[in-house]
Amino acid sequence: MGRVKAVSIVYDRPTYSCGEWVSGRIVVELTDRTEVRVLKIHAKGEEYVRWTERHGTGKSRRTRVYTQQLRYFKHKYLVIGTDSSDEVTVLQEGIHEYPFSLVLPPTPPLPSSFKGTYGHVSYWMTAKLHRPLKLRIKTKEPFTVYNQVDINTPRLLEPHTAANEKTICCWCCASGPISLKAEVERMGYVAGESIKIFVEIENHSSRKVVPKAAIVKTIIFHAKTKKKTLSEVIIKTKGEPVLAGQKDSRNSMMLEIPELIPTLMNCSIIQMDYSIQVTVDIPRSMGLTVDLPIVIGTIPLHSYGGPASDFNNQYGMNYSNVNHGFPEGSAVEAGFQAANKSLGYYT
């Protein structure tokens, strides 16, 4: 870079939320007197998905790319000079620091930073240094957007129940039905909490069955009319067996929530959610399963007599879509950072 030893972006802090000012400074280190025409920064935020699939066989085999992008914002800030002028500013040898501050849009609410296998939610700033008759110098530095998810909202405090039933058939004979009903006390939880799952099983079959429960993370990447789904079992447990012809309404299981990235809110083309999957294992047959959607938040449960933190109103969190029927196209902080780091994302 000749006389320009380094151009860097230094943030005042690593994380920001909706409506906050992202602040810091651009540092330009010079080894000699230098003419500068323009120094500017761009701030951008986007949601992006991309994956490939192979279709056809033989000579007709083709690889198709599925991709979609959603831009949240794009801000430009001139530090030195103007785009419409060729005038130059002379900078002397040494280190020059230029403070900046740019506000993040308060609405619509921005989703938290996220990186997955087939897509990401990313925020970054780019500094560009233009000199007369010289190549442009460009540097890019990401920052993290971290938005609180408050579980103290009426919808997330409600109990949630799911039920299912099946009859086992063996050749021309059918045994009695097996029914499953599962319930959790509420839909909203934070890392470190234990979820108690109440299970009621009526086993009218001739086989011993065993209830199991797991926390499942599901990520769906949307690209126009196509979607890519990834599911992962986070933690699982097993309940007491229910013998043939018995009813058990006292069976309960506990799942302790590990450090997890909170449920991803306000995303249009990437969706990450959690559920409690309760399954009755049936020998020599497909299991009987129900799903109980849950939200992993950052603000723990508090009494209504205490101070209120209505992030639902402040950030416009939309909990109505927390289920497994999302339309097409439609984090405590240490845990968020640790989980994102485990995914290879910046901190």
Image (cartoon, rainbow, N blue to C red):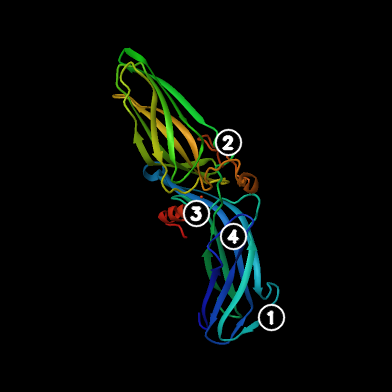
The residue tagged 4 is 44
Q: CA distance from mark 3 to mark 1?
A: 46 Å
Tag shown at residue 333: 3
The residue tagged 2 is 155
For marks 4 and 1, the one nearer the N-term is: 4
For marks 1 and 2, the one nearer the N-term is: 1
Question: Disc 3 or disc 1, which is closer to the eye?
Answer: 3
**Residue 63 appearing in the image:** no
Q: CA distance from mark 2 to mark 3?
A: 23 Å
Give residue 142's position: percent from left, percent from top.
52, 62
Identified by mark 3, the residue type is: Glu
Figure check: 197 above or below 10: above
Q: CA distance from mark 4 to mark 3?
A: 23 Å
Q: Image quadrant of residue 236?
A: top left
User: How many numbered marks appear?
Assistant: 4
Q: How many neighbours does mark 4 have within 10 angstroms: few (below 14), some (14-19), or many (20 or more)?
A: some
Compared across the picture, whether 81 is left or right of 126 comes to right
Furthest residue to the right?
84
For marks 4 and 3, the one nearer the N-term is: 4
Tag shown at residue 87: 1
Tag shown at residue 344: none
Please name the residue shown 54% across and 70% down the image. Answer: 10
